[in-house]
Every structure is written in structure tokens, then in C-alpha cells.
Amino acid sequence: MSKVSMPLYVGDVSALARNLRRQLHESESLPSHVEMLNILVKAGGFRNFQHFKAQHDARKGLDVPRPSAAEINYKLVKRILRLFREDGNLAHWPKKYSERVICLWVMWSRIAARRIYSEYEISELLEQQHLFEDHALLRRELVDHRLVRRTPDGRQYQRIEVQPPAEAVEVFRLLRQ
């Protein structure tokens, strides 16, 4: 059986060394092969070797040119990408909350920063981004998740500038390709 090469990227080699030293010091005996794999990937920021392997397998189908952080959930990224058509439009509203939130971030990214929209303008913009014809749902969800602010009378909308999660940034990048 051939071995599959799974590169481990670590952002801070000093932190890796400290973490390895601590884990080896806590070990009562010389760790086995599997224990050593777990120690290495834990020091690299993963929960265990299975988490590392799942992230590696999930990245296979994606065009990821640079090593990414361990905290990006590539399984979630793949599920989100399947919700979008080739033209970038959202095909349907997902049932899972975690998928909905990332889809909202994609909608958020398509709203111009520092621009004030009328209700009609924001509705038109959102209508062009999805296929399930419920721009009111998207508008409401964006406000509820504090990604967009609206005036009390609902006449004006503006994007709130916040840092998107790592998965959302990865989805933005892959949708642009």
C-alpha cells in the first residue's frame, strides 16, 4: 500500500517546538507511531490526526494555492460552494445554520462598503445574487446578524464593516476564480 503525502504547515516553528517538548515531557514512555502523529498535529494546531487528515482530504478538490490555517473548516467550504452556481448566484437557501451564515457573508461581501442604499436598491442588489426569489429574507437575515444596519423606518441600509470568518474569506476567494 502506498503512502499519501500529507504536508503539515506550521506558522510558528518556535511554538511547535515548545508544544512538542511539553507533550513529550508529559508522556510517561516513548510514544507509539500513532501517538507521535497526534502529538505532531496537535502541536500544529489540529485537534488530532483524524482532524488533520479530514482537513487534508477536504482540501484535495479545492484549488488552494497556499497553505492555510488549521482553523478553516474545508468540509464546510466545500458544502457552501455546492450551494452556488457557476455564475456565483446562490441556488437555494440552506437548511443548516452554519451554511446560512457563510452564505450571508457572501451576500455581505457583494454590498459596497460605506454606501447607503435605499430599501429598493438593497432589494435589487440581493435579488440579483440568488435564485430562490426571497430578497426580503436575505435583507432581514443580514440585519439580524448585524452585517447590515438599517434606519428605524427601514428606508436606508448600509453594510457594517466587520472581519468575516476564515471560511467565508476562503469561499469569497474560490467563488471569484
Image (cartoon, rainbow, N blue to C red):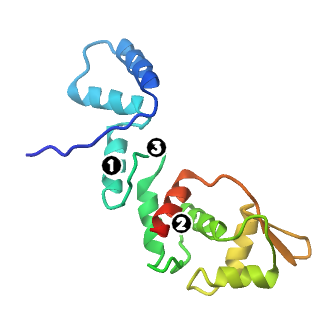
Q: Secondary structure at mark 1?
A: helix
CA gap, disc 2 and disc 3 = 24 Å
The percent position of residue 177, horizontal first and vertical second, equals 44, 68
Seen in the picture, residue 149 relative to 44 is either above or below; the reply is: below
Task: Check residue 96 in the rendering and tell me which mark sits there, or answer none.
Answer: 2
Q: Secondary structure at mark 3?
A: loop
Name the residue located 32 percent from the left edge and 61 percent from the top edge.
61
* Kind of residue at badge 1: His
Q: Secondary structure at mark 2?
A: loop
Front position in the image: 115 or 91: 115
Image-quadrant location for residue 74: bottom left
Q: Residues within 10 Å of mark 1 (few under 14, many from 20)?
A: some
Q: Residues within 10 Å of mark 3 (few under 14, many from 20)?
A: some
Image-quadrant location for residue 93: bottom right
CA gap, disc 1 and disc 2 = 23 Å
* Kind of residue at badge 3: Ala
Seen in the picture, residue 145 relative to 30 is either above or below; the reply is: below
Task: Check residue 69 in the rendering and tell me which mark sits there, or answer none.
Answer: 3
Q: Earlier in the sequence, mark 2 or mark 3?
A: 3
Which mark's residue is nearer the viewer, 2 or 3?
Answer: 3
Name the residue located 48 percent from the left edge and 75 percent from the top edge.
84
CA gap, disc 3 and disc 1 = 11 Å
Name the residue located 36 percent from the left edge and 60 percent from the top edge.
63
* Kind of residue at badge 2: Lys
Task: Check residue 56 in the rendering and tell me which mark sits there, or answer none.
Answer: 1
